[in-house]
Image (cartoon, grey):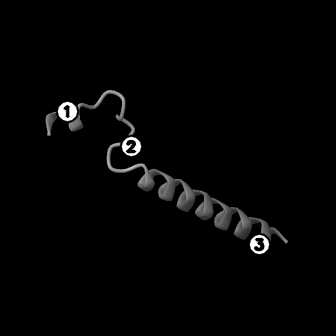
Amino acid sequence: MVNFIIGGLIFGYAAYALVTYIRKSKQGKCGGCELEKSCDHETQQ
């Protein structure tokens, strides 16, 4: 029983990490960055 709970937690976290990775990658290079609001990368190009 404990094995199923631990396995569920592992697969749940893996699914969560995959979904957040896909959402950030859809935002683009600078949209997914944590420094999005304070970075001037796009203005230098």
Mark nearer the viewer, 3 or 2: 2
Residue 29 appears at what percent x and percent y? 32, 49
Going from N to C along the chain, the mark reached first, 2 or 1, is: 2
Q: Is residue 12 left or right of residue 45?
A: right
Kindly identify the amino acid type of the residue bearing the numbered disc 3. Asn
Q: Nearer the viewer, residue 16 or 26?
A: 26
Q: Which residue is mark 3?
A: 3
Residue 32 numbered mark, or none: none
Name the residue rendered at 42%, 49% in the picture: 27
Q: Which residue is mark 2?
A: 31
**Mark 1 neighbour class, 10 Å CA radius: few under 14, some 14 to 19, many 20 or more:** few
Farthest right residue in view: 1
Q: Secondary structure at mark 3?
A: helix
Looking at the rendered structure, the kind of residue marked 2 is: Gly
| Residue type of the residue flagged with mark 1 | Thr
Residue at horizontal 73 percent and vertical 67 percent from the top: 8
Crowding at mark 3 (Cα within 10 Å: few <14, some 14-19, many 20+): few
Q: Nearer the viewer, residue 3 or 24?
A: 24
Give the quarter of the image for residue 35.
Answer: top left
Left or right placement of residue 13 versus residue 43 in this view: right
Q: Is residue 42 left or right of residue 29?
A: left
Instruction: Look at the numbered discs 1 and 3 and tell me whether their residues touch, using CB distance below 8 Å.
Output: no
